[in-house]
Image (spheres, rainbow, N blue to C red):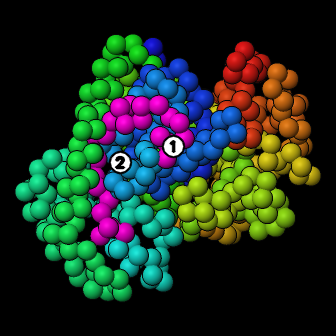
Amino acid sequence: MPVKAVVGMQWGDEGKGKIVDVLSADAELVVRAAGGSNAGHTIIRGGKKTVLHLVPSGILHEYTRCLLGAGMVIEPQRLREELDVLEQFGTPRVRQRVGVDPQAMLILPWHKSLEHVREARPDARGTTLRGIGPAYESRASRLGIPLALLAHPELLQTSLEALFLDYAPIFELGQEPVITPAALHAELMEVASWLVPMFTDVSLETARASSEGRTVLLEGAQGVMLDTLHGTYPFVTSSSTVFGGLLSGIGLGHGAVSEVVGVCKAYATRVGHGPFPTELDDDNGRHLAAFGGEYGATTGRLRRCGWLDAVALRKAVRLVGTTALALTKVDVLCDLPEVRVAVAYEDADGRPVADFPCDPYRVADLKPVYRSFAPWATPAPGEPLPDALSEYISFLEGFTRTPVSLVSWGPDRSQTLLRDASGVCRSLDA
């Protein structure tokens, strides 16, 4: 059976959780590659809502195995809380079906303290304050604490002392007390009692599942335009969000993957600071925020909203090698007088810009050039897509040279249509 990957194509919050839930209905293994609890995947099934921050979205399917890859950074307390919530939600055999790669990095209280000090500065990046960036930094500096050290208490103590020594000058700039290495070691030994039994070689388990012909789904976090190398640096996440980063975070060769589904909203949003060419500060933007429920599942922050940027989407398709697109939240645009899509830009001097710049510092000066579309009615299960929506989708397919294979509206799994190459749609149960 093919291995399928799901990647966000914008600035995150595209609706990947729902799409992974839809595509993992028949998957035996769902694997997440990178990121931490800064990701928030909201899933609504049968009127019940679950927000997942660490565990892959496929966990709600009773027989699916879910793995957290080596490229992730994991805060133990949040992982434990999430497992508890899933059990309270009625999810069967949660702890038996979740595996964690010991090469993933621990997020420590120190990482959060470090981030709070930095975000209090005038040049703050607008992070989620979850300690994600500092945890990735500690890996790159080779002073990080991988989960594997939970199984080696003496080495863990030595490593904690070395990391604390590195951070101490920054801690002195903050106002809050900082936990000592000895106290933190004691807390982590309690974590080891329940987390070490969940260790697994995610790379090996995923490769074996693929070679045995089992259905495997790979889950990305955040979005391509937040990639640490190819996004709008420095307002990016701390991991690689493109397809290559997904494979690296799991430990899998590209030849194993046959399909890459890119998830994008019918409009665009962004959280925190950073350039956003199509951002709307008007009634249309407020409509998108209100009707789209554009509040972060992790932070609760109001998202910045704007028209779909097809030029940025085309770059994302190129970076990822996307084989199909999943278009979400098409219903949010229904009540607007017109729908717009950015198809090019003009720079500060009025000169045309056809492609999204590789120089991230140019992006803030770009003015979008729009194409207008008629609004459409909300799709209905079992009914053809409205003509205006079909025209919108056909344009995106032509502009990005990528077929749209799923169309989603509303939060529930049933509000999804599968679309074939000829544009014919069918419901999930058809």
Provide the residue designation for mark 2. 72
Name the side, left or right, on which 6 lies relative to 189.
right
Residue at 45% x, 81% y is 120
Image position of 289 (left or right of 261): right
Classify 101 as above or below 295: above
Which amino acid type is shown beneath numbered disc 1?
Answer: Gln
In this rendering, the answer to whether 183 lies above or below 151 is: below
Q: Residue furthest left?
A: 154
The answer to whether residue 152 is seen in the rendering is yes
**Nearest to the observer: residue 335 or residue 363:** 335
Horizontal and vertical percent position of residue 400 = 65, 36
Q: Is residue 89 magenta?
A: yes
Q: Quadrant of residue 281?
A: bottom right
Residue 37 place in picture, x, y as percent: 44, 54
Quadrant where the N terminus sits is top left
Q: Residue at x 82, y 67 (%)?
A: 282
Residue 195's quadrant in the figure?
Answer: top left
